Amino acid sequence: MRHDPNAAQPLSAEPTDTATKAAGQESLAPQKTRIMGRTSYLLAWFGGCVSIGTFTMGSSVVGTLNLLQATLAITIGCFVIGIALALNGAAGYKYGIPFMVQARSAFGFSGTRLPGLVRAVPAIVWYGFQSWIGAGALNMVSATLFGFDNLIFYFIAFQFLQIALSVTGFQGIKWLENIGSAFILASLVYMFYSTTQRYGDELSASLLTMKGSWGMPFWGATMLFLGIYSTMMLNVSDYSREHKEGSGPGLLTTLYAMSILPCTLFMGLIGYMVSEATGVADPIKVFANAVDNTPLLMTTLLFIAFAQVTTNVLNNVVPPTYVLMDTFKLKYRTAAVVVGLLAFATFPWELVKDESAAGLQVFVQTYSAFLGPIFAILVVDYYLIRRRTLDLDKLYDSSGPYRGVNLGAVIATLVGVVAAFSISTVSWYASLLPAGLTYFLLMKYWSPCRRFCD
């Protein structure tokens, strides 16, 4: 039997101690050493799920939903996220395998390049984009407090700082996210308080009394907040394999939902209220222009910068790093450095221009249409085809039954993509059943898929 060289070699090298692991000691092998308890795991997700786009999502529902409906839409979206993460992260949690290994049973060794590409390319693009935003915030703090204004310097320094943090692996991620979550929560509470104090008189009473909608716009809003985390729903096994054993599905769902809910609720409602009060869709611009309130300005800018670090290191480094490890057989630290350098090649200074917004939106809509179908396929494969039982020898045997490409998974993905584009308002939801059902039927009744069922 011939095993995947990148995964098989570290198997014997995995330490037996379940409490410690050296920094940067990551591999595609089944995870023996788990370093995150429940509290640590919750705080890691809390710190890593601060998306600046959540502000914009809150702004986008002004005039469509009242305050109660917006709050419920965010809450429902977060609990759907929690359920989805618990479902797709179960394989990684049980067997200690990363996303790229989990996907082999559904897509095949070569076929995993499709879900890997769908997850890796957006991550690298957002890595560069968010690094530029974070560097811009630091540059503004520097210019305001010290008179030193050099965005290029801060971008290069900021990016190399993130590369240095990312090569420490999950040991570094654990402490960064755990410690950073306190600053993030304090900043959000202060920004929320400042918003209500600053714009309280201008906020329309209709925020509570307007009729709003409980129909498609409401459920579309739940998907807006859900969609921010839809990429992480694919590679959640990369993180769940680090969580110590002993948490059941219900508790895991609660951990995910309650870690994501506070940040999403605060940021979504801040965006909602600021947009209602000022007519400006971007709360960051509003806070940045609050020159009469220097503490608020500094808090906001430092929050922006720090949020880019915690989000990038967890969300935008780990997925493409594991993809490079799987595809090119690189070591973790080498792959992490390559991912950081590739972020420079995304030319984020071009992506932030107003004329680039339309193209960036198309890019997001395109890769998002693939996320729901791939998620559905992975869940159907693990629960209905494999019955929650995986053969690790086959998953690490490149010449075994999972060799090559599973055409059933590719076809099911395309069916889901068509469904997603057909009903764009709730595209993620709309893609699940067509993709999942197509995959199940092809696996059961189409002969080219037969060996993947063994």
Image (cartoon, rainbow, N blue to C red):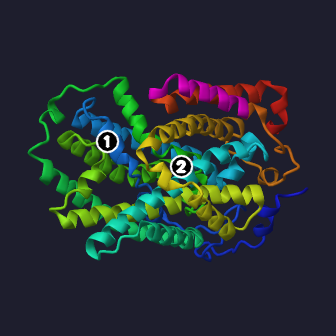
Q: Residue at x 91, y 56 (%)?
A: 1
Q: Looking at the picture, how far across and down is residue 42, in whole percent?
A: 44, 60
Q: Looking at the picture, how far across and down is residue 169, in whole percent?
A: 59, 69
- The quadrant in which the C terminus is found is top right
Image position of 141 with respect to 203: above or below: below
Q: Which residues are magenta?
A: 410-425
Question: What secondary structure predominates along the stretch shown in magenta?
Answer: helix
Exactly how many numbered labels are in the figure?
Answer: 2
Residue closest to the far left? 201
Residue closest to the far right? 1
Closer to viewer: mark 1 or mark 2:
1
User: Is residue 194 found left or right of 365 in the rendered image?
Assistant: left
Residue type, label 1: Gly
Query: Residue 232 — which label?
Result: 2
Q: Residue at x 22, y 46 (%)?
A: 274
Pointer 1: residues within 10 angstroms few (<14), some, or many (20+)? many
User: Is residue 399 found left or right of 210 in the rendered image?
Assistant: right
